[in-house]
Image: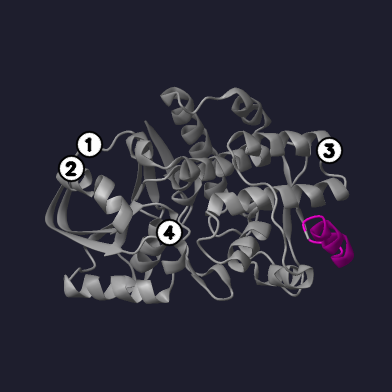
């Protein structure tokens, strides 16, 4: 199954997302696979057997959000120079969101840009992060504050990779599926209530539907100047949680889950979401054992961290909120006292 991504760039860039179509990949130049220690043990041998290239090199990084930084980027760049990777070469990101974000970033800056392929191995990265060309790394000020928009040449989503995921990692990916449904597709949200992801067809449909939604959004707004920002539902709160708690304490999807509940409290307060709808969303998150409550350490500090969010500017915070289930609204006029009162619920 292929999903066509046609980005309206001056270069008329176009690529496909392949679902369960990875067989043999013939590349007539050098290839460097960037992966981490965990994924390497599980999937690297299988992937290498299916890649036919002039040269094939492996760059292995440490596993974890805490390594998504400039130090790791420098290590990867040095390895690529050591292997004499050139501008005609292709990088392959074999891993989850961290590997995908960093490989995309490296591809965008190495010799001013080389081709790269996304090969996501987690549910979260298959349904969201690996489609659309966002790259990024973290620093002490927040998550993904350094990065680029740089599109891959192809994406391969293999459901076989997901069989080795720990339950917690899998459930973290479901948070992003729920996010997509709440923001864009009420019918999909209702379907999710009875979906069984132990069934391959249900899982494959959810992946397909999320990629279709993401593709439509990215094709309309590649650089996140408008509708693409809606994909950050739960992330404004969630990114602060990740930073405050310390990277690695919560999985990204877990932080997004708690961020969704926080965003819903604000949406309820300003009349965009009913209590019944908020409860339905929270119940669906709980169905997958996702955390829905975060205890803030300091309300003022948490609030101030919002101003580092990439959607905020000129001391105005933009919140992405559900406008009922299946629709969204960007809110930039939420008063400080209202937001802080919402935060007190989690204090």
The percent coordinates of residue 42 (x first, y second) are 27, 46
Residue under pointer 2: 50
- The foreground one among 169 and 212 is 169
**First of labels 4, 3 by sequence position:** 4
Q: Which residue is mark 4?
A: 98
- Is the residue 128 above or below the residue 77 in the image? above
| Percent coordinates x, y for residue 2 in the rendering | 37, 34
Question: Label 2 near label 1: C-beta < 8 Å?
Answer: yes
Could you tell which of marks 3 and 1 lies nearer the N-terminus? Answer: 1
The earlier-in-sequence mark between 2 and 3 is 2
The residues bearing labels 2 and 3 have C-alpha atoms spaced at a distance of 50 Å
Callout 1: few (<14), some (14-19), or many (20+) C-alpha neighbours within 10 Å? few
The percent coordinates of residue 40 (x first, y second) are 26, 53
Q: Secondary structure at mark 2?
A: loop
Q: CA distance from mark 2 to mark 4?
A: 23 Å
In this rendering, the label closer to the viewer, 4 or 1 = 4
Q: Which residue is mark 1?
A: 23
- Marks 4 and 3 sit apart, C-alpha to C-alpha, by 35 Å
- Report the front residue among 300 and 114: 300
Is residue 284 shown to the viewer in this render? yes
Please give the range of residues in magenta.
332-346
- Dot 2 and dot 3 residues touching (CB under 8 Å): no
For mark 4, give the secondary structure: helix
Q: For the residue carrying disc 4, how many other residues have a C-alpha within 10 Å: few (<14), some (14-19), or many (20+)? A: many
Which residue does the numbered mark 3 point to in the structure image? 275
Q: Quadrant of residue 180?
A: top right
Task: Let me know if residue 336 is in the magenta part.
Answer: yes
């Amino acid at each position: 199954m292929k999903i066509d991504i046609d980005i309206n760039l001056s270069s008329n860039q176009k690529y496909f997302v392949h679902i369960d179509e990875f067989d043999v990949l013939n590349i007539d130049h050098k290839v460097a696979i960037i992966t981490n220690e965990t994924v390497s043990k599980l999937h690297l041998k299988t992937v290498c057997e299916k890649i036919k290239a002039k040269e094939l090199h492996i760059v292995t990084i440490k596993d974890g959000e805490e390594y998504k930084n400039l130090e790791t980027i420098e290590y990867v760049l040095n390895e690529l120079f050591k292997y004499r990777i050139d501008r005609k070469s292709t990088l392959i990101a074999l891993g989850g969101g961290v590997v995908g974000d960093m490989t995309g970033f490296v591809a965008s800056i190495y010799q001013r840009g080389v081709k790269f392929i996304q090969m996501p191995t987690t549910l979260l990265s298959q349904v969201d992060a690996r489609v659309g060309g966002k790259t990024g790394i973290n620093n002490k000020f927040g998550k993904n504050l350094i990065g680029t928009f740089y599109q891959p040449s192809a994406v391969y989503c293999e459901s076989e990779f997901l069989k080795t995921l720990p339950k917690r990692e899998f459930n973290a990916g479901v948070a992003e599926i729920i996010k997509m449904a709440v923001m864009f597709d009420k019918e999909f949200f209702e379907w999710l209530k009875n979906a069984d992801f132990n069934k391959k067809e249900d899982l494959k449909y959810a992946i397909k539907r999320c990629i279709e939604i993401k593709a439509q959004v990215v094709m309309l707004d590649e650089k996140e100047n408008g509708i693409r920002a809606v994909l950050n539902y739960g992330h404004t709160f969630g990114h602060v949680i990740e930073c405050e708690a310390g990277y690695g304490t919560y999985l990204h999807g877990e932080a997004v889950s708690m961020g969704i509940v926080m965003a819903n409290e604000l949406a309820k307060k300003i009349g965009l979401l009913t209590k019944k709808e908020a409860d339905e969303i929270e119940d669906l998150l709980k169905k997958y054992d996702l955390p829905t409550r975060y205890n803030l350490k300091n309300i003022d500090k948490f609030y101030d961290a919002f101003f580092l969010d990439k959607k905020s500017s000129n001391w105005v915070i933009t919140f992405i909120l559900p406008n009922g289930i299946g629709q969204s609204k960007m809110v930039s006029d939420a008063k400080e006292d209202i937001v802080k009162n919402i935060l007190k619920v989690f204090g």
